[in-house]
Image (cartoon, grey):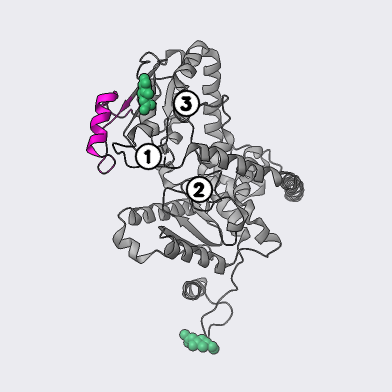
Amino acid sequence: MGRGLEQGGGLRAAASSIRKQTFNRATMQRVFFGLAIGGLCFLGVYTLQTLRNDMAIACSDDLRATRSMLDSDVVALQTVAKRWLRPWERFGSDGGGITQDQVSKVFAFLQQGQGIGSLRIQVIHGVLQEPTVVKEWLKTKVYYPPRIQHWMALFRHIEKMHGLPDFLDIIVCTEDQAFLPASFEHIGGAPIFTYASTLGHYDIPIPTMEYYGKLKDVDLEAVKAQKWEERIGAPAIWRGSPTGGLYTRENYQQKQRYQLVNTTKHYPDLVDARMMPCAPGQCHDEAWAAMERELPTGGSQFKYPDYIKHKFLIDIDGNAWSSRFILLLSTGCVIFKIETPYVEYFNEFLVPYKHYIPVASDSSDLPEKIQYAVDHDDEMRAMSENLVSSFNRFIANGRWELYVKTLLTEYSRLLIKPPRIRPNGTRKGATDKAVSEAGVLRWRT
Ligand SMILES: *[C@@H]1O[C@H](CO)[C@@H](O)[C@H](O)[C@H]1NC(C)=O
Ligand SMILES: *[C@@H]1O[C@H](CO)[C@@H](O)[C@H](O)[C@H]1NC(C)=O
């Protein structure tokens, strides 16, 4: 990616120091919150005399779809959502909440000042409204209309699975990059929800409908049935085309994907990585010609059934975060993950060397790490089992949708709800539809 990885490391350190500062208070709040919720649940359960083993189900209807989910896993998802929202929490307590005015200001900032493709989505009285979009962008940016569809599909999907909060006013970004640097002076407005955030940004990562598309290919039964000892060990496999910004004659050798294939080409017993042909607009001709001379090229993309026959897979960023990663996590393979600045909500549940093997951003340590994996088969089998278990608990089985629902609910709590707006002349008891229409008119001016 264009963003330097050293810079990524610095940002990560900065973000982690910010997180540490707020850790103690947050921990206390969480403990207190946990005790309070626990007490309420107990009271509720006791009163209704419907003792259930799963406290989560007793606590909330939202969790009906996740019947077998452990209470602690539900709390873990909530904790991640709250952590991303923490920079805005002070508006929720001291400042009294995020106002729609603040949302409007951030939306205007993105459109005018920054020229960033974004859209504003509102839910009023539980009803999902048509999004507010940037009209000029509809005509000029080819990727914008499909991404609007993509975001709306996500909201409709969550509405169908879990219902949406009663009120939402949210800005989502259609770009592949995060925009709000993690420093306090930038938190004057409302958050931006995005596909791709980093620990150095306050943009809030939210799973996209892309997850839904990728996870359709997942076959957990096949993974379960595939014996570890019958999987193919080394070489670890990777196929992909040159992405990560435009490849020119001057820069192609600095690209992460180039380095992956170049660094590993002399270790065919350990790594089988090939560069597939360039997509239109992604490479200058000289750059592609040079890559054809210098690298193993060609081949075709692996499919899910290929992945699950292997033990070792490699994952690397493309133009932004790796959208393939989520699929690979389900395969029961050991994933060699090339360092990335991007974060997704499930990063929280993936511990290096327990669930996957981290690799330097230039892939320089990849051959030796795969050699280690070959030499420590029992350890790798345990890693595979750890990963499948975390995938089942926090991503598959409706869990990523539950995460989105939780994130939206927590965000909604921070928003100041507008007063019930009634059309002129309508008395109390007006239908929600009329109220909602009036609301839309008022809020969009
Ligand atoms: C490509 O790999 C070769 C050896 O395998 C190395 O000498 C060369 O420096 C690498 N090129 C780049 C640009 O990393
Ligand atoms: C509603 O009432 C306000 C003030 O009473 C008035 O200014 C406004 O024009 C009315 N709107 C409509 C649509 O009648």
Depth check, front residue: 260 or 51: 260
Mark 3 Cα-neighbour bin, 10 Å: few <14, some 14–19, many ≥20: many
Looking at numbered disc 1 in the image, what kind of residue is underneath it? Gly
Choose between 373 and 405: the one closer to the eye. 373
Residue 73 part of the magenta segment: no
Q: Callout 3: helix, strand or loop?
A: strand
User: What residue did someone put label 1 on?
Assistant: 244
Instruction: First in sequence, mark 3 or 1: give its number.
Output: 1
* Residue 122 image point, x, y percent: 49, 63
Marks 3 and 2 sit apart, C-alpha to C-alpha, by 22 Å
User: Horizontal and vertical percent for residue 19?
Assistant: 66, 44
In the displayed orientation, state which residue is furthest to the front: 250
Q: Give the percent coordinates (x, y) of residue 379.
A: 55, 16
Residue to which mark 3 is pinned = 335
Identified by mark 2, the residue type is: Ile
The residue segment tinted magenta is 274-302
Please say if 434 is above or below 2.
Answer: below
Instruction: Kindly tell me whether residue 334 is visible in this rendering.
Output: yes
Between the residue at mark 2 and the residue at mark 1, the CA separation in whole angstroms equals: 21 Å
**Quadrant of the drawing holding the N terminus:** top left
Q: Residue at x 59, y 71 (%)?
A: 418
| Residue 282 rendering spot, x and y as whole percentages | 29, 41
Q: Which residue is mark 2?
A: 206
- The disc, 3 or 2, on the residue closer to the chain's N-terminal end is 2
